[in-house]
Image (cartoon, rainbow, N blue to C red):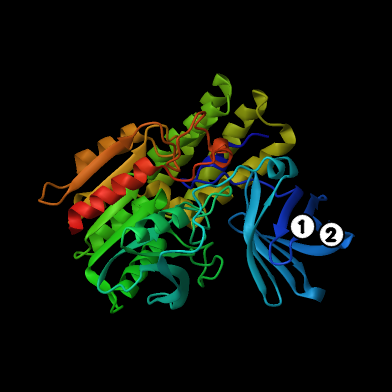
Amino acid sequence: MKLFFLFLSISMTSLAQSPCGDWYATLKAADLQLVFHITKDKKNHKVTIDSPKQKAFDIPAEISLLKGNRLKVEMKNIGFIFEGVYYTDSIAGVFQQGAIVENMTFYKEAQQNNKPKRPQNPKPPFSYDIEEVKFMNLQDSFYLAGTLTLPKNNNQTPAIVLISGSGPQNRDEEIMGHKPFLVLADYLTSLGYAVLRYDDRGTHASGGDYASATTLDFALDGESAIEYLKGRDDIDSNKIVVIGHSEGGLICNILGARIKNLSGIVSLAGTSIRGDSILQIQTRLISESNNTSEQELEITQNYNREIFNAIVKSLSISQAKIELEKISKRWTKVMYKNDIIKRNEKKEVIKSVSETMLNPWMYEFVKYSPSEDIKNLDCHVLVLIGSRDIQVTSKENIEGYKKLLPKNRKLQTVKELKGLNHLFQKCSLCTVSEYGQLEETFSMDAMEEIRDFLQEIWN
């Protein structure tokens, strides 16, 4: 079954419907390969674990599938816990056993053997200080955990907050082996700026609940990060910039309009048009990149359009649920007649669409328009979008920013960067699946644009 609502997320990730399969990773603390064998019977998922180096195979374990494509694998008798998020090509999360706490990413065997290098990942010794920090979300009363990198002997240093895209992200915004925020933080701190990056709420070391959160909730987390920096003696509270990627770029618009003394925002592949428009463009381009037939593309696009329109017009999630069920019943008949799905898949499609679209984050995102926030930006603005981005397209969103940005004396730079994808990599195929195949994590072209912007507003 091909279900295009798998792509109804502005995140950089490609989430999978099922984690079933064989998954391979190495626990670095013990130099130990672990293998998950995940299967499913009629109703339940099951998992066994191999540790080949210890000559231990098919060890029974417990698996729980949670909201937001999250899973937990446990062997309670030995205190083994792995919690992560499953994608089409990987399972990324945190392993814990006793004193060992380690980030791990499991790959399918073939992909592991051909795993590309990541030459931009910084390596010690570092020329700056690194501080592990926690700060409070004062509204919801939980702590967010992050890393603050600071120039040595810093005093009243300009500071930057990094805000990740959608999907449960760690502080490095790790995806398919890439760590864009680690690379960006290293580069910017080496230029003399303090950089704070943090784990999303409810993920990795941060508290809070991810599954029920919306974009506005994540904006509160970003605002809490700014307030934390303002309270530090070594940070210049009048020189703080927020850099956000994808959904984080959208959050930059919210924070730039809300926080009046913010120095500036940098929107990396952020949106300027309403969520339903973004998703309609995104699903079409991703489907085309996967060589979807014209007939299937037309049917799914029309299906999507009706779903989006119903959500935009709805006054509540409960009202939208009734409409979505009617629409899905009608369109699954069309999909079945055109051999897009099988008869026994109709209920699964209806259920999957409902669960995806009525998730609080998705429901709000479809209805939300950045236009009012962009009109009210009273800080310096840099907008960068790659010309080969198929998740947040440059044409429509650059036009939106240029039309909506207010006329004032602030620096406003809106640029399309040639040949770059959604992750700001120089790409060839420029598909979502190519992200992990590319060695480059973050183009120097983009980093130099950010450098020039910061130097102009702060020097």
Residue drawn at x 33%, y 67% is 223
- Residue type at the position of mark 1: Gln
- Eyeballing the image, is 121 above or below 143? above
Is residue 204 in view? yes
Left or right, residue 101 beside residue 255: right
Of the 4 image quadrants, the one containing the N terminus is: top right
Count of labels shown?
A: 2
Give me the disc on residue 134.
none
The residue where tag 2 is placed is 53
Residue drawn at x 83%, y 50% is 41
Q: Which image quadrant for residue 308? A: top left
Residue drawn at x 48%, y 40% is 307
Return the residue nearer the eye: 170 or 117.
117
Secondary element at image label 1: strand
Give me the disc on residue 33.
1
Residue 13 picture location, percent across and down: 54, 46
Left or right, residue 258 beside residue 179: left
Residue at the farthest top position:
294
Verify CB contact (< 8 Å) between mark 2 and mark 1: yes
- Eyeballing the image, is 28 above or below 343? below
Residue 301 picture location, percent across and down: 50, 30
Q: Which image quadrant for residue 70? A: bottom right
Q: Distance between the residues labelled 2 and 1?
A: 7 Å
Residue at the farthest left position:
409
- Eyeballing the image, is 316 above or below 78? above
- Eyeballing the image, is 363 above or below 345? below
Mark nearer the N terminus (2 vs 1): 1
Is residue 371 in view? no
